[in-house]
Each structure stands twice: as C-alpha cells, then as structure tokens.
Image (cartoon, rainbow, N blue to C red):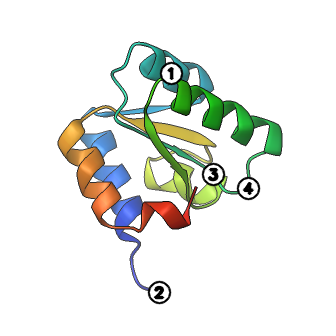
Amino acid sequence: MKPDKVLSMLGIAKKAGNLKSGSFQVEEAVKSQTAYLVIGATDGSDRRKKDITNMCEFYETDYFFYGTKEELGKCIGKEYTALVAVTDEKLAKSIVDKIDIKSYR
C-alpha cells in the first residue's frame, strides 16, 4: 500500500506541535483564528459535517473531509479522531498542495 501523503503530513504536524485534535480543541483554534486548515473524517455524522462547514466558512478557515476516523487517528497516534486542525500556515499549505481540495468539500 502506498503511503498517504496527506496523512503523513498530519503526523509531521502533530510531532511539530502544530495540530489540534478533537471537537473542542479544533473549535477553539478556529474561533481564535489560529487554525489554517481543518480536516474532518469522511465517516463523521452529517450533523457534525454541517457544523464544521458552517463554522469554517464563517471564520474563513480552509477545510475538507478526508480519510476515516480511524485513518485520521492512526496518523496522529490515537485510536481514532473525527476532526483535526493544522495551526501552522506553511504545513497547512503543504497539505492543501498535496490534494485537489475542491474534490473533498
């Protein structure tokens, strides 16, 4: 299996201390405008996806849905997580460059 570059970059962001995970931390980062990119799990609930979309659009934060809860969690050393935020602008840009963001919204 080919390594997933987006998930690998999330692991790098976590090790560098530039990643928030979980609803509370991500929401706090978005509202304080320290989040440059929010990634939600594709298998999250429709209600949660709508909440993330509304919050990110209101605060003008880039976001997309990518991977499963298990995949997102595994890449940052957890069993699972449904939501992460990248708090470093260069890392966020690098992650966005690895995918076609429009195909994931």
> Residue 55 got which mark?
none
Please tell me which of labels 1 and 3 falls first in the chain: 1
> Residue 25 got which mark?
1
**Disc 4 residue type (three-letter):** Asp
SS category of the residue bearing label 3: loop
- 48, above or below 46, in the image: above
Distance, label 2 to label 4, CA atoms, is 21 Å
Residue at the disc numbered 3: 41
Please tell me which of labels 2 and 1 falls first in the chain: 2
Q: Report crowding for label 2: few under 14, some 14 to 19, many 20 or more residues within 10 A (C-alpha).
A: few
> Residue 1 got which mark?
2
- 64, above or below 14, in the image: below
**Disc 2 residue type (three-letter):** Met
Distance, label 1 to label 3, CA atoms, is 16 Å
Please tell me which of labels 2 and 4 falls first in the chain: 2
Instruction: Name the residue at the left extreme.
Output: 90
Residue under the image location 29 percent in, 34 percent down? 18
**Residue 101, percent from left and from top:** 44, 60
Residue at the disc numbered 4: 43
